[in-house]
């Protein structure tokens, strides 16, 4: 366990535990409304077609009018 006020520095504690020092400062950000709006249809597509990879999922989303990723095909 990392202790912020310990005798060892945070860098040394993270080194001893084998974790990245920068990970100590990570703070997850809340999901945006836009992400939630995308995840609903993506979850449904993934459930209906579990063998679809990312490219087929992108095409399925495009059929529903949701453009994601590189749509140029290049």
Image: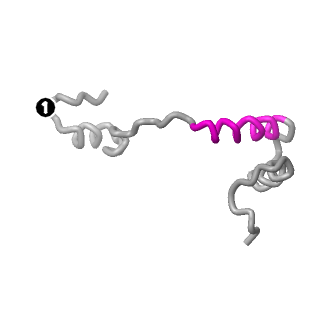
Q: Residue at x 84, y 47 (%)?
A: 64
In the picture of the structure, the residue carrying the numbered disc 1 is 7
- Give above or below for 28 relative to 1: below
Q: Residue at x 76, y 68 (%)?
A: 73
Q: Is residue 60 magenta?
A: no
Quadrant (top left/top right/bottom left/bottom right) for the C terminus: bottom right
Residue 27 on image: x %, y %: 41, 36
Residue 23 on image: x %, y %: 37, 41
- Which secondary structure dominates the residues rendered in magenta? helix
Relative placement, left or right, of 44 versus 24 is: right
Quadrant (top left/top right/bottom left/bottom right) for the N terminus: top left
Number of numbered labels in the structure image: 1
As helix, strand or loop, the secondary structure at mark 1 comes to: loop
Label 1 Cα neighbours within 10 Å, binned few <14 / some 14-19 / many ≥20 = few
Q: Residues in magenta?
A: 32-47
Q: Residue at x 18, y 38 (%)?
A: 9
Colour mapping: one colour
Relative placement, left or right, of 62 versus 12 is: right
């Amino acid at each position: 366990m990392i202790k912020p006020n310990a005798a060892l520095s945070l860098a040394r504690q993270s080194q001893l535990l084998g974790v990245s020092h920068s990970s100590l400062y990570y703070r997850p950000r809340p999901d945006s409304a836009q992400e939630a709006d995308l995840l609903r249809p993506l979850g449904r597509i993934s459930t209906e077609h579990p063998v679809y990879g990312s490219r087929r999922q992108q095409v399925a989303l495009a059929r529903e009018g949701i453009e994601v990723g590189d749509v140029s095909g290049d």
